[in-house]
Image (cartoon, rainbow, N blue to C red):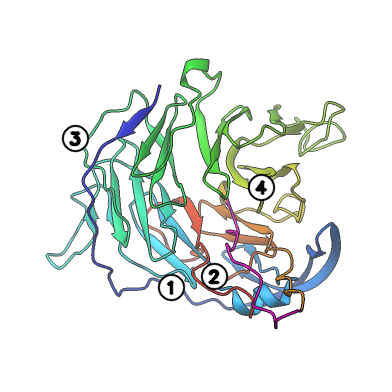
């Protein structure tokens, strides 16, 4: 059943405050990054270490995109706080509980539900915050804000994902999917009665479909989002990881077994696959995705559990103009990579995902609960 939210179009003025941190203690380590599509090589790169958490900044292997395509990302905390990094701008924050403002000058927007995620507008000049009660809050050039009284989902909302056309989807723990604005409804997992609660959602780059991820590793696909496999969760080994026990294992059936709870899913650049991340820092690739690394593979000592994964958004651009009679130059493959996010604000960058900072060591009021990569505003190769 299509459960559509009908709301008035509103927007909020962008604020000029920018929350950033300073980062020191640069160290060297070797991690894996893509040198070209289909090839993986070892690169020595700089890593930022904050509060015992390694922040791995992978350099892009596509020079034209690295030079002309700006990257950035946002993190959102359980108190509604928003942290912006790289080219991503800060447009405002929420406040949860709603009475938590200590001064009359507080400009944070009170939230009726506990924050669960953040989604970017198509041009990256705004975003929405979502509450567990289904309420949403618009910042920058975002529209379609949903008030607390708009509807009452049967189960808590757990994720918000932009549809790429100015709207967004909300996913509930029971598998329900809600649309806002021009986002289209392609189905929900609610009629299937998922064995475990839904914990995350991801959309195909063209906005023509989406996946829902269950806490047990089950994947539900809708629209043009194809199913490529799932993960199976097994108890950790009593004496630590050993062959066939603990960590990511590829069984003969082609699915993955993991020791940590699946908490995040992200699409590949062409929508032909997806990555699944677990609370233990494991990474399972499906479809046409590549495994560029993970905190578990790097043997990083996590100071806090992983809470999600965000893919580098795909630039939607044409090849540059070529002289008459000549073949147009190819912009090359789009950037392919992902950021894995920790509850303490740690950011781990892999593949073509660039590291622009983290919230680790900022003495967060509440743990980080979600993240989003900034969509391409401009920057096609010239």
* Nearer to us: label 3 or label 1: 3
For label 3, the SS is: loop
Q: Which residues are magenta?
A: 310-325
Q: Quadrant of residue 313?
A: bottom right
Mark 2–mark 3 Cα distance, whole angstroms, equals 37 Å
Mark 1–mark 4 Cα distance, whole angstroms, equals 24 Å
For label 4, the SS is: loop
For label 2, the SS is: loop
Mark 1–mark 2 Cα distance, whole angstroms, equals 8 Å
* Nearer to us: label 4 or label 3: 3
Query: Dot 2 corresponds to which residue?
Result: 357
- In-image side of 31 versus 355 (left or right): right
Q: Earlier in the sequence, mark 2 or mark 3?
A: 3
Compared to residue 204, the image places residue 254 above or below, namely: above
For label 1, the SS is: loop
Instruction: Mark 3: give few (<14), some (14-19) or many (20+) Cα within 10 Å.
Output: few
Instruction: Mark 2: give few (<14), some (14-19) or many (20+) Cα within 10 Å.
Output: many
Query: Dot 4 corresponds to which residue?
Result: 281
Kindly indicate whether the residue at mark 3 contacts the one at mark 2 (C-beta within 8 angstroms): no
Residue drawn at point x = 46 percent, y = 73 percent: 21
Residue 74 horizontal/vertical position (percent):
46, 61
Query: Dot 3 corresponds to which residue?
Result: 149
Mark 3–mark 1 Cα distance, whole angstroms, equals 34 Å
Residue 316 horizontal/vertical position (percent):
57, 62
Q: Which mark is residue 20?
A: 1
Looking at the image, which residue sits at the far left?
104
Kindly indicate whether the residue at mark 2 contacts the one at mark 1 (C-beta within 8 angstroms): yes
Q: Earlier in the sequence, mark 3 or mark 1?
A: 1
Residue 4 horizontal/vertical position (percent):
33, 32
């Amino acid at each position: 059943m299509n459960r559509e939210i009908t709301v008035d179009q509103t927007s909020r003025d962008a604020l000029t405050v920018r929350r950033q941190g300073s980062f020191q203690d640069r160290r060297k380590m070797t991690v894996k990054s893509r040198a070209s599509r289909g090839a993986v090589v070892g690169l020595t790169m700089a890593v930022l270490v904050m509060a015992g958490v390694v922040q791995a900044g992978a350099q892009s292997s596509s020079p034209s995109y690295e030079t002309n395509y700006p990257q950035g990302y946002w993190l959102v905390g359980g108190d509604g706080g928003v942290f912006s990094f790289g080219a991503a701008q800060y447009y405002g924050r929420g406040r949860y509980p709603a009475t938590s403002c200590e001064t009359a000058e507080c400009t944070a927007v009170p939230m009726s539900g506990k924050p669960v995620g953040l989604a970017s507008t198509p041009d990256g000049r705004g975003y929405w915050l979502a509450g567990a009660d289904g309420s949403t809050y618009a910042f920058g050039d975002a529209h379609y804000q949903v008030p607390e009284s708009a509807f009452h989902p049967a189960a808590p909302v757990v994720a918000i994902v932009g549809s790429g056309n100015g709207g967004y989807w909300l996913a509930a723990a029971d598998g329900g999917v809600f649309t806002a604005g021009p986002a289209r409804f392609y189905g929900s997992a609610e009629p299937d009665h998922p064995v475990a609660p839904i914990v995350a959602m991801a959309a195909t780059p063209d906005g023509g479909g989406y996946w829902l991820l269950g806490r047990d590793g089950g994947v539900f696909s809708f629209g043009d989002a194809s199913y490529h496999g799932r993960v199976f969760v097994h108890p950790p080994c009593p004496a630590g990881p050993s062959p066939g026990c603990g960590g990511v294992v590829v069984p003969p059936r082609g699915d993955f077994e993991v020791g940590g709870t699946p908490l995040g899913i992200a699409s590949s650049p062409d929508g032909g696959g997806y990555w699944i991340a677990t609370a233990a820092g494991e990474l399972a690739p499906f479809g046409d995705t590549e495994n560029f690394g993970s905190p578990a593979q790097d043997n990083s000592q996590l100071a806090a559990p992983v809470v999600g994964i965000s893919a580098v958004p795909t630039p939607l651009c044409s090849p540059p103009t070529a002289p008459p009679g000549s073949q147009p130059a190819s912009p090359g493959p789009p950037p392919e990579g992902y950021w894995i996010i920790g509850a303490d604000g740690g950011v781990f960058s892999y593949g073509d995902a660039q590291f622009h900072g983290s919230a680790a060591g900022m003495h967060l009021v509440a743990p980080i609960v979600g993240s989003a990569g900034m969509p391409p505003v401009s920057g096609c190769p010239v």
